[in-house]
Every structure is written in structure tokens, then in C-alpha cells.
Image (cartoon, rainbow, N blue to C red):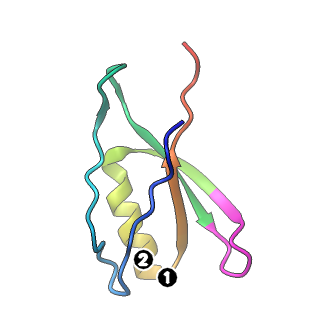
Amino acid sequence: MGKPLHLDVTADGSVRHPIVLQQEDQTKGEALRFEIMRLDDVDGSAVDSTVVDAASVNRIVQQAAAMGQRIYIRPAETSAS
């Protein structure tokens, strides 16, 4: 599994250093998927999570930033073939 993705999001919801997510895993020919966890404001524990494709990550980051939510993004685990 890859490293978690950390984004620097400003108060207005924009990402300071935009990160382009590669749409396809070049070694396997599969679309990349990411697990996005919403974090508790008090203790930082995961409240819930969802798995999305790379194309959806930016939209979710913008929504979370607009609402002041803390999120954690990492590559989703792939099932063994």
C-alpha cells in the first residue's frame, strides 16, 4: 500500500499545492482508488470512510474544506487477484 496523501487546504477550500492523481495504475492497468476517512474534530479518530476513484478526490476535498471537516486520504487496499 502507498503513502497517505496529505493536502494543504486553505480556509477558503483551495489546495495550496495541487496534487494531480494519476488515473490509472500503470503496472496493473487498473483505476486508482482512494480511501477517504472523515476524522473526529476532538480526538482525530476516523468517524467514517469511503472508497472513491481518483477523479472524485478533488471534489470531496473541496467539500470537506468548505465545511471545515478534517479528512485523511490514502490509497485503497487492492484485493488479491
Which residue lies at the image location 49% right of the left edge and 40% below the top edge? Answer: 2
Given the current orientation, which residue lies at the most extreme bottom position?
11
Mark 2 touching mark 1, by CB under 8 A? yes
Which of the 4 image quadrants contains residue 44?
Answer: bottom right
Left or right, residue 6 beside residue 1 = left
Residue 61 pos. (x, y %)? 40, 66
Residue 77 pos. (x, y %)? 56, 34
Q: Which residues are magenta?
A: 39-48
- Residue type indicated by callout 2: Ala
SS of the residue under disc 1: loop
Observer-nearest residue: 28 or 13? 28
Residue 43 pos. (x, y %)? 74, 76
Neighbour class for label 1 at 10 Å: few (<14), some, many (≥20)?
A: few
Tell me if residue 51 is in the magenta stretch.
Answer: no
Tag 2 residue: 65
Which of the 4 image quadrants contains residue 6?
Answer: bottom left
Which residue lies at the image location 45% right of the left edge and 55% below the top edge? Answer: 5
- Residue type indicated by callout 1: Gly
Which residue lies at the image location 32% right of the left edge and 86% below the top edge? Answer: 12
Residue 53's label in the rendered image is none
Tell me if residue 40 is in the magenta stretch.
Answer: yes
